[in-house]
Image (spheres, coloured by chain):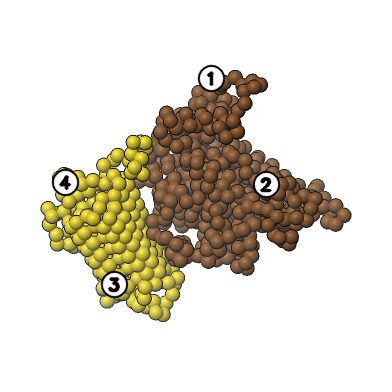
Amino acid sequence: MGTAEQTAEVVDLSETSIRELNQRLHDAADGGPQAWRITHPGGLHAIAAGINAPLEIDIDGHVGYYCVGMNKEANVRIHGSAGVGLAENIMSGTVIVDGDASQSAAATGRGGLVVVRGNAAARCGISMKGVNIVVEGNVGHLSAFMAQKGALVVCGDAGEALGDSIYETHLYVRGSVAELGADCIEKDFKEFHTAELTGLLAEAGVDADPADFKRYGSARQLYNFNIDNADAY
Amino acid sequence: MTNEPTHSAGMRESALFDRNVIHEIQRKAREGIYDIRGFGAKRKVPHFDDLLLLGASVSRYPLEGYRERCNTAVTLGTRYAKNPIELDIPITIAGMSFGALSAQAKEALGRGATVVGTSTTTGDGGMTEEERGHSEKLVYQLLPSRYGMNPDDLRRADAIEVVIGQGAKPGGGGMLLGQKISDRVAGMRDLPKGIDQRSSCRHPDWTGPDDLEIKIGELREITDWRIPIYVKIAASRPYFDVALAVKAGADVVVLDGMEGGTAATQDVFIEHVGIPILSAIPEAVDSLKDLGMHREVQLVVSGGIRTGADVAKALALGADAVSIGVAAMIALGDNAPEYQEEYEKLGSGAGFYDDWHEGRDPAGISTQDEELGKRFNAELGGRRLANYLRAMVLETQTLARACGKSDVRNLEPEDLVALTIEAAAMARVPLAGTKWIPGLDGKTE
């Protein structure tokens, strides 16, 4: 999950372009350094986007939009905060953000694990399709909007319209929920869910008691159009 | 059709409440839901039929149709991409999803397009092996739903099309009804089988033109700046939307008029939102020219393209290429008369069938029903599409040569006049027999 090994290949983004960095990371799929340390990210966009190899990457500082976008296999740790669309459409691997994440974190992600140690802004996990997300702090409004698969764990509070128009994603929230979105309801914990939540907290390295969480999911009332539900559309 | 009322002299039908309107009011009162359908706008709007090409005479020389070449090739994506798309003809196949169409139909589109050297486009639902395997040039759409989106398919695409809007429903999302959600479609979209699949109208990870620029930058990074990135917009405010797409870094702008087709949308959306492609092209071209980007950023237009005449007129107004969807489906065999009896059983008829969202297409095209799908022969469908495209290209060349052009893209607004005041104003070409372009205060373009 991100290393700080002394043998890591170091790329200083105050001297190297994003294009050159990403090309080198893409080329690493065919061999070359597997451990990387990226310094002076300076909020630049699309850092480490499109990786297709089991690389270990540390990023020393804040990153801009779409950091680690569409990641496959790489384990990335961001020692700072992340801009919009962190790890969007992630396929596999792990992305850990030590700070906060802006809106649309892990949007449409299809696999892998995204961990935000701080807070995540609006639309966290929007249209998520299989990714697992663990947020140690709070999430903003419309998180897990139209969420399809995977799980979103919120150790703090959730904003308005949580899980609006949700499909099959599992939501776990320890704090308060400002408002549930359309077709999202509180649900009972079954053995599977306790095990899933326990596993995700452990994988994310979060010390929290699963018993403190509530579970939310789809009431499945909007799955097929019904005019009697017109108020919910 | 059964229960057709007798209509005879003395029975005066209301212009406002004609039989279609009355039928629809009665249906809504019975069912309590708006009409959802496929196809494109069915109302009459100013279109390319309202324009004429002038042809050459003394003031301009025509080209000899049987001896002198008229180029039809066009290159898309020359602005930033290392590998622009080289097309042999200026007609491409528009985005249509696997889910909306059967896998066999997607394969046929690829077969037909590849034979004549043009591109096909994926749709909302991801890329299938059938279409990748049979399309030499394949454009991969990035839509708000991101169904099936993955970096491997991005990297094996020949271009990416960021879809902002669709002419049939500017500002609207999509809906694939549950009856078309087979195991395969559901698997590709990460959703359970049999439920309605809603597609949102806004992208999940960007919200405005500044964000779009960054998003395009990410897509270029993921694909190592190899392939072109198109931005598809619905025709509503084309001057500003084209400018913003160019500012955001588009290599190609795809502009879809209100006549453009859809697999499933509310009828009220199809018929009442957006503007005709005839009126949108001049605005888009103005925008590109004002930015000094006409021909640098290529313009592909769509919405009701049916014939080589439509193609020639669209190019004359300043487009670099056109795109077809509904016409391609008809060429494959949609609405074919051999299925008349079955269309009637569905309450429709050959030439009228537009319930593409229901998945019961007798022609096996807009369906996921395996038995219906088997009726459709992808090889034959591909041949029909190739034939149709070739015929349209010949028509386009015929008209271009008649106007003295050695390249179809040399057609220009000066080759056009309008038959109606409305078309003259929208297309910004003179009313036939006059020098009058309404709306330009006596000035000519």
Q: For mark 2, does the 10 Å Cα neighbourhood hold few (<14), some (14 to 19), or many (20 or more) residues?
A: many
Q: For mark 3, does the 10 Å Cα neighbourhood hold few (<14), some (14 to 19), or many (20 or more) residues?
A: many
Q: Which image quadrant for residue B187? A: top left
Q: Are marks 4 and 3 in contact (CB under 8 Å)?
A: no
Residue A88, position as x, y percentages in the image: 36, 59
Q: Chain of mark 1?
A: B
Disc with the residue nearer the chain's start (4 vs 3): 3
User: Which mark is on residue B48?
Assistant: 2
Q: Amino acid at mark 3?
A: Gly
Q: Which residue is mark 3?
A: A80
Q: Is residue B313 left or right of residue A55?
A: right
Q: Which residue is mark 1?
A: B3
Q: For mark 1, does the 10 Å Cα neighbourhood hold few (<14), some (14 to 19), or many (20 or more) residues?
A: few
In front of the other: label 4 or label 1?
1
Chain B image colour: brown
User: Which mark is on residue B264?
Assistant: none
Q: Secondary structure at mark 2?
A: helix
Seen from the viewer's position, the closer of residues A65 and A111 is: A65
Seen from the viewer's position, the closer of residues B325 and B369 is: B325
Pointers 2 and 3 within a single chain? no
Pointers 4 and 2 within a single chain? no
With respect to residue A164, does B388 lie above or below?
A: above
Q: Amino acid at mark 1?
A: Asn
Q: Amino acid at mark 2?
A: Phe
